[in-house]
Image: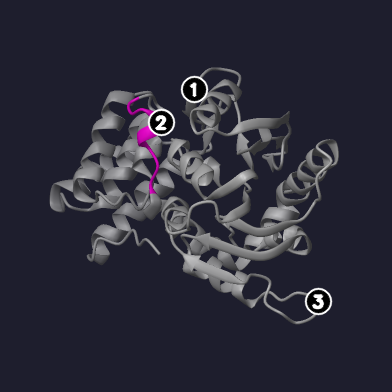
Amino acid sequence: MYSASSGDKRLDRRYAWAEEALKGGDPQAAIDILDQTLAENYGFTAAWHLYGLAQEALGHNEEAATAWRQYLDLDPSDRVGARLDLARIGALAAEQATSESFSGALFDGYAERFDSHLVGSLQYQGPALLKQALARHCAQASRPFQFGTALDLGCGTGLMGEAIRAEAGFLAGCDLSPRMIAKAQAKRCADGSPLYDKLATVDLTAFLASRPDASADLVVSTDVFIYVGDLAPSFHQSARVLKTGGLLAFTVQSHQGAGIIVGRDRRFAHAEGWIREALSLARLRPMLVESQSVRMDRGEPVPGLIVVAEH
C-alpha cells in the first residue's frame, strides 16, 4: 500500500498540516507549507501530488499539471493516480491515464470493507443487473443460459462470481489486488467447493492474453472498466479468447458527450458511441446496450451502461 511518508518526521508533519489546510478550504495555506517542504526535500512525491491538488483548488490548472508531471517524473509507476488527475483537467488524453499501480494499491487497501461498503453504502447492483441482462439476451436468442467456461475480469472479492457460478461450468477470475484475490479464494459454494476454479493476481489484459484462442464461452467484467481508459486491448483479447457465439458482458460509467473522459470521481466514463465503435473494431457485435446505474455516489445514481456483445 502506498505511503505518503518522506522518511523525515518533521516534513511528514508539515505534509499533514498542508493536507488539513486543503481539506479545511485554505489551499493557499497548503501551498505555502508545501513550498517550504519541497524546498527541503524535492523528491517528496506525495507532496508534489498534494501541491497539484491545492493549485487546482485555486483554479491554477497549469500549475497543477506541472506539479503532477513532476510527481510522475519521480514516480513513473503512478501509485497515487496523477495521470487520472491530469486527464481530469484536460492535460492528458484519457486513453493514456490508466494506472495499474494506483488501481492495485487502491483495492488492496479497500479489500477488508469492500463488500459491505459497495453493496451497503453505495447500493451496488452490478452483478445482479449484469446477470439479468445476460439471462434476457439468452432468452431472446433462444440459447441456454449456461456457459462452459467463464472468465471474470477484475473479480475483486467474487461478487460477480457468486452471481454467475451456477451458470458456469468452469469459472476463472483475475484481479490486480492480492488482498482481493485472497478474499475471493476464501469464498465457497453451498457444497463447500471453491467459488472459483482458478484465480490469478494479474492485470485483466495480461490475464486474457494468457488464455488460449477460442477457449471461453463468457467474459464478464462489472465495475472494472471504470478504471481502464482505452478498452480496445481488452475487447480485442476478449474476442480472441471467445468461441464463436461467445459473449462479452460488462458495465461501464457513461457520459453524454463523445469519447472517453475522466470524471471528478477519478473514474473513466465511456460514451455509448465509443463503446459501440470499439466493440465493432474488435469483431464483437453489441446485442444489448442499456442505460443503467449500478451504484450510487453521494446519494445520486452514477450514469452507466450494461453491455452484452457477441463474438
On the image, numbered disc 2 is attached to which residue? Answer: 94
- Report the front residue among 209 and 246: 246
**Cα–Cα gap, marks 1 and 3:** 43 Å
| Closer-to-camera residue (290/214) | 214
Q: Identify the disc placed on residue 259.
A: 1
Image position of 89 with respect to 117: above or below = above
The residue lying toward the viewer, choosing from 170 and 15, is 170
Position in image of residue 227 (x %, y %) = 49, 44
Q: Considering the whole magenta stretch, tell me its main secondary structure.
A: loop
The answer to whether marks 1 and 2 mark residues whose Cβ atoms lie closer than 8 Å is: yes
* Quadrant of the image containing the N terminus: bottom left
Instruction: Point out which mark residue 30 bears.
Output: none
Image position, residue 138 (x, y; %):
80, 43
Which mark is drawn over residue 190? 3
> Is residue 239 found left or right of 84 in the rendered image?
right
Task: Give the mark nearer the N terminus: 1 vs 2.
Answer: 2
| Three-letter amino acid code at the position of disc 2 | Ala
From the image, state whether disc 1 or disc 2 is nearer to you: 1
| In the image: residue 53, left or right of residue 136 | left
Label 2 neighbourhood size at 10 Å, few (<14), some (14-19), many (20+)? Answer: many
Q: Horizontal and vertical percent for residue 294?
A: 71, 41
Residue at the image position 26 percent from the left and 28 percent from the top = 63
Instruction: Count residues near mark 1 (Cα–Cα under 10 Å), then give few for <14, some for 14-19, many for 20+.
Output: some
Report the Cα–Cα distance between label 3 and label 2: 42 Å
299 vs 20: above or below = above
**What residue range appears in magenta?**
91-99
Residue 95 included in the magenta stretch of the image: yes
**Quick one: label 3 or label 2, which is nearer the N terminus?**
2
Residue at x 58% of width, y 25% of height = 276
